[in-house]
Structure formats: C-alpha cells, structure tokens
Image (cartoon, rainbow, N blue to C red):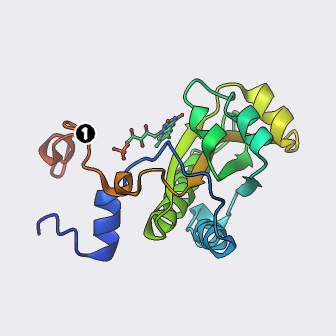
C-alpha cells in the first residue's frame, strides 16, 4: 500500500503538522470537550490511566507557563494549554509505560484537535519547580509535558508540507526479523 492521504486515520497521521502560532479566539467548548475525551479514550498499560489533564486558559497563566522550558514559548499565545500530569516517571521503580501511555493520550488529543481544525504542539518542561508552582499538583505527581491548542493563525499550516528531510526514509527505520 502507498501513502493514501484520503484514508481518514492515515491521512490525519501523515498530514498533521505541529502548530505554534494561534489565532486569538478561544476554543469552542465542544471542541475542548472532544479533545479531552480523545485523551480519556486512550489505551494504557493494564488500563491504569495514570494521567490528569489540567486545562489552562487564563492568558497570564499561559504566559507564565511559557517559561517552563526553552521551547515552551508557544503556550503564551495558545487558546488552551493542557498540562499532562502523571506519577513521577523518573522514580527508581517507575515503569516506562507511564510515558508510553501518556504519549498515546497526547497524540490522540492532538489528532482529534486536528480533525476540528485546531493546531497543537507539545512543550517539554525543563523548569520542574516552576511547573509545580504554577500548576499546583501534589508532591507525588509530575508534569513532563504540556500541550498547546488553538485555531491556527494560518489555517493552511495545519497541513503544510513537512520540511524537506522532515521524516527519515522508511527504509532507514524498518528492519526485518532482526536488527
Ligand atoms: C516528546 C515531544 C516533545 C516536544 N517538545 C517540544 C517543545 O518543547 N517545543 C516545541 O515547540 N515543540 C516540541 N515538540 C514538537 C516537535 O518539535 C514536532 O513534533 C516535530 O518537530 C515534528 O513536527 P511536524 O509534525 O510539524 O513535522 C515536541 C514533540 C514531542 C513528540
């Protein structure tokens, strides 16, 4: 099979781009609800669902959250920031499935958003103390990523072509039977 972008699931996976500049308008409430439900529906190891989603929409709060990492600036202009909170994945006994599961939930939210014409991108938290102070989650919880969501300032950006070399060649990443 070839890359047929008319198939809705594959088409979304292949065409979706990261969006970092957003229009000023807020998200329609039913759109936000859909995004959060897409996260809720995600599968997880042993169905443990070790995640909480903190929805941030206050502009000053978003500006402050934009300081949690060197590449988190897009949060300042997002309609919504969603902080993805889990048990601490860095603890000595923490299973790696915490972040595997969270990645699935995050991608489901971003794909559901894309279908509604909403752009999104992750922000990686480097300033852990700042994120904890701004988001107020309990001591045994941790925030490694937030997601920015918003209608893109340029709607064509939702499906702009990937930059040249944007994805490694399939032959480079797929092997048969053994490495
Ligand atoms: C785990 C993870 C962390 C990321 N962290 C950031 C980030 O801190 N800031 C940012 O602008 N983009 C971040 N991104 C977005 C990537 O840069 C983006 O997915 C990649 O460049 C591909 O973009 P494209 O789909 O538009 O080609 C992150 C993506 C992932 C999967």
| Residue 105 falls in image quadrant | bottom right
Q: Is residue 150 visible?
A: yes
In the rendered structure, the answer to whether residue 62 lies left or right of residue 75 reads right
Count of numbered badges drawn on the protein: 1
Q: Which of these two is toward me, 58 or 94?
A: 58
Task: State the SS at label 1.
Answer: loop
Relative image position of residue 88 (x, y in whole percent): 73, 40
Relative image position of residue 80 (x, y in whole percent): 67, 53
- Residue identified by numbered label 1: 163
In the rendered structure, the answer to whether residue 104 lies left or right of residue 163 reads right
In the rendered structure, the answer to whether residue 86 lies left or right of residue 23 reads right
Relative image position of residue 3 (x, y in whole percent): 16, 64
Q: Is residue 88 visible?
A: no
Quarter holding ligand 1: top left
- Assign the N terminus to one quadrant of the image: bottom left
Q: Which of these two is toward me, 36 or 173?
A: 36
Disc 1 under 8 Å from ligand 1? The reply is yes
Q: Is residue 1 above or below residue 134?
A: below
- Assign the C terminus to one quadrant of the image: top left
Name the residue rendered at 79%, 28% in the picture: 130
Name the residue rendered at 34%, 61% in the picture: 13
Q: Is residue 129 above or below residue 80?
A: above
Q: Is residue 125 above or below residue 120?
A: above
Name the residue rendered at 72%, 35% in the picture: 63
Name the residue rendered at 55%, 68% in the picture: 43
Q: Which of these two is toward me, 88 or 32?
A: 32
Is the residue marked by circle 1 packed among few (<14), some (14-19), or many (20+) residues within 10 Å? few
In the rendered structure, the answer to whether residue 88 lies left or right of residue 115 reads right
| Residue 150 falls in image quadrant | bottom right
Q: Is residue 179 above or below residue 45?
A: above
Relative image position of residue 83 (x, y in whole percent): 70, 48
């Amino acid at each position: 099979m070839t890359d047929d972008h008319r198939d809705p699931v594959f088409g979304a996976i292949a065409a979706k781009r990261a969006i970092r500049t957003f229009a000023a308008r807020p998200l329609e409430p039913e759109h936000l609800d859909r995004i959060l439900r897409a996260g809720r529906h995600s599968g997880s190891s042993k169905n443990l669902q070790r995640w909480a989603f903190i929805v941030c929409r206050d502009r000053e709060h978003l500006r402050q959250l934009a300081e949690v990492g060197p590449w988190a600036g897009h949060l300042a202009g997002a309609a919504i920031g969603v902080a993805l909170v889990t048990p601490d994945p860095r603890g000595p006994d923490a299973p790696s499935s915490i972040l595997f599961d969270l990645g699935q939930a995050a991608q489901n939210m971003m794909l559901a958003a894309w279908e509604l014409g909403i752009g999104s991108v992750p922000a990686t938290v480097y300033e852990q103390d700042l994120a904890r102070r701004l988001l107020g989650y309990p001591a045994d919880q941790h925030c490694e990523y937030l997601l920015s969501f918003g209608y893109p300032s340029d709607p064509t950006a939702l499906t702009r072509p990937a930059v040249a070399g944007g994805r490694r060649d399939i032959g480079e990443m797929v092997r048969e039977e053994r490495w």
